[in-house]
Image (spheres, helix red, strand yellow):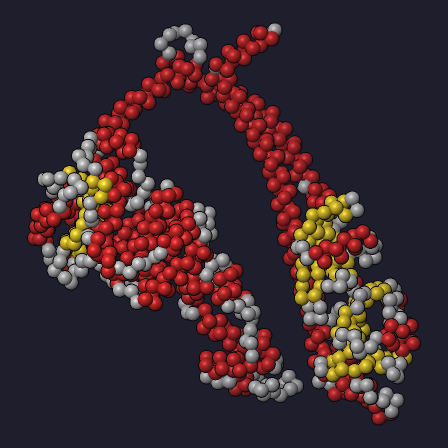
Amino acid sequence: MLKITRSWMRGAFRSLLYRFFFFFLVVSLLIQLINLITYRVNLWYFESELEQNYNKSLSNIADGLNNVFTGIYNSNYLLSLDADVMQLFSSGFNVDHPSQYAVVSQTVHSLSRISRMGEYVDRVFIYKKKDDLIISDQGTYSGTDFFGRKNALEQYPKPFWQNYGSQSRPFQILPPSRSSSRNGAYILPIVQTAIAEYRSNDLYVINLKVDPIIESLASSKLTPNSMLFIVDDNRQLIASTEMNAPREDVRDFVKQFQSSGSPVLRTAVGNKDMLAIQTSTRFVFKNLNMIAVVPVSDIRDSMKHVKYWGATLSLIALVLSVLLSFLFSKKLYAPIQSLIVKISPSPEPAADEYKVLDREFHRMMDNMDLLSNSLTSISPFALEQWVVRMLRYSRIPGEQDIASFLEKCGIMFKHEHFAAALIRTKFTKAFYMDYSNAEQNAYYDKMASLLKAHKLSEYQSLVVEIESNVFCLVINLPQDADREKLADYFEALFGLFRHDEVLHDLFIGMGDIHQGFDGLQESYLEAMKAMWRLSPFDNKRIHYYQKEDEESVTILLGTNDDKKIFNLLASVKREELFELLDKVIRNHVAMGLSDFTIKELYMHLFVIGSQVLKHKDKTLPEATYREYIRMILSEHPLSVDGMTEFIYGYFNKIMDTIEPQTGKLESLAFKPFIDANYQEDIHLELLADKFHTTPNYMSRLLKKELGKPFNQYLQELRVQKAKELLANSTMLIQDIWASVGFNNRNTFIRAFRKIEGISPMEYRLQHAPNPEEGGFKETEGE
């Protein structure tokens, strides 16, 4: 039986039908594996989304508390403006004197206004310890009655308040306590021994309701069993969703997690896996930490439907895949079976269908190779394209590949040495004005045909088109050949186009003689350098590159800089690369470069970029390459800024080609970030660090987007925001300049005068409906 099974398996796998079946089946199983991996990825993604959502929720809660604490902090200044409150708060105030009753009454009224500032405020009072008297927003009480009945807190009996001294911090948030007078509700006391700059031995206390904070935390829970906490820097619990049902193990973990400073932690608490998320927030009085503890079981429970349906659908897909594999195999096998019957030399079915197909396919491929060889041998265009790619500093193929290709093209070079000459036509304005696009294209084709037809009689040569008006003459010649003997040939070229000299002018740069195709690349670069020494304003139209030409050129880059630029470019380290380029370019600008030396520097950088492309076996698109060649061969003088922008773009194109997924700074929008954070201390170094680039490069990007220098835009934006506050609010000028991002009053006033022509106070007097309606007067010196 086993022998029969093995025989059937061998026979089955010889048939393409069964091979197709098993192929489809394996593909189906791979899809099921991908589904399993997808589930795990979704679980990870859900955790990441949960973490981000909790960060947003905790930040929103923190913003709400910050508004409360900021209002409390600002209330100090409101009270400090009330002379009656300040008189009562002073240690020497005599409460029992009848003449002071009005002061007490006014203080109760002022405290009542403070208590109505927000829904979180429960009670506001001043404790005159010497007189054992409470002046609150609801009236006056004795200390015993107030702390024993009206404001009875479990953790803070009357002795606590009597012993609370001025040696404590002027502002302090105490841990929350249950209130007996509020049916066990939690109260958060904020104790102050100072109001603004006024200090006293008495206490100014604002009680906050903790229950609204707890409700806010509870409403922010994203999973049923999540636990949210607010903890201060001293690891004191301020509020929590678990205050009424505390778990000591969880509270201990929260305190340890808060001390660690880690934003996210995955650990076990009480034999349960937990995901802990922490957000720190700076408030007026102290720093608070917003912490969420999420059971991992909640996350998995939320994914159970995905897991269930994933498993169910996978099972259904497996059954369907078996059926479809068989049906597809039959459908796909039918034409192959028909093909096998037609090509099989025997009417009997083949023993191994695969071998029959493989033999016939190889025969057809051999025929295709013969056809390809025939086409290549009669196609000079392929040779031209091959030479053009090689001139662009691409990787030189191996000797065997070169020999095979040249043999197919029917080319056999007699010598091992080559030289390159660049032939460039400079067209006049009349050419573009008098000829249509179609006529210009026809003229280009005619010019190319003339150059290719006019061959050297003494040496083998080949003319290839680099761009529309630039050609390269490749000459194969002996090492000891004299380039000056080519003068007759070049003079004949000038003669070919002399009858149209009104429309164009011809320039020729000749490189030196070098060995091999690597040497041809070097000669091509030398021809470029020779071309630079020709000016349309001189009578000279041809220049032979000489080594002496290099003697007048400053040593532009050291060996170390060459290596660093090459390595940074090849590693796609944009920030470090552009920082080094800025340094190199600044150093050479300081030396005072001539137009020729500027081109020499950027030609050197261009060659480094070409070497990186060659090293990575990459190439730039045709249009991009033509653009850069046109820039390099331009006879017009180029500024340092223009060439810098050119080389930055060239290097960015290379890095995008090497690593296409690399993000581009040019695709970012900086203006929304600046508009949203203008009041902060933002500067070029901060933006450069945030977006991972150099300050100089960031300055150029900002100017391009904003249309003006960064500092000018930021100052104008801040002054505009200050104008809105001056015209539409009663804020003090000293508060306005601080709120819009200025560091000091003098800087603000100078900037305002420079842009608006008048001072901030004069602007307010002109545009505010009634500057004194806010109940105060001010001067610019305030």
Can you see residue 184? yes
- Please state if 205 lies on the left or on the right of 464 as rendered: right
Image quarter of residue 54: bottom right
Residue displayed at 64% across by 86% down: 776
Residue lying at the far bottom in this picture: please name it.
99
Q: Where is residue 721 in the image (x, y as percent from the top left)?
A: 53, 74
**How many numbered discs sit on the rendered protein?**
0
Image quarter of residue 477: top left
Q: Nearer the viewer, residue 286 or 550?
A: 550
Q: Compared with residue 181, is residue 244 higher up or lower down, i.e. above or below? A: above
Q: Nearer the viewer, residue 173 or 117?
A: 173
Q: In which quarter of the image is the C terminus?
A: bottom right
- Please state if 187 lies on the left or on the right of 676 as rendered: right
Image quarter of residue 396: top left
Q: Position of residue 766 (x, y in %)?
A: 52, 86
Can you see residue 381? no
- Please state if 491 lies on the left or on the right of 309 as rendered: left
Q: Which of 313 and 501 is in front in this view?
A: 501
Q: Where is residue 564 in the image (x, y as percent from the top left)?
A: 41, 53
Residue displayed at 44% across by 10% down: 351
Q: Position of residue 688 (x, y in %)?
A: 49, 62
Q: Compared with residue 122, is residue 435 higher up or lower down, i.e. above or below? A: above
Residue displayed at 87% across by 83% down: 130
Q: Quadrant of the N terminus?
A: top right
Q: Which of 41 and 761 is in front in this view?
A: 41
Residue displayed at 24% across by 47% down: 524
- Please state if 8 lies on the left or on the right of 602 as rendered: right
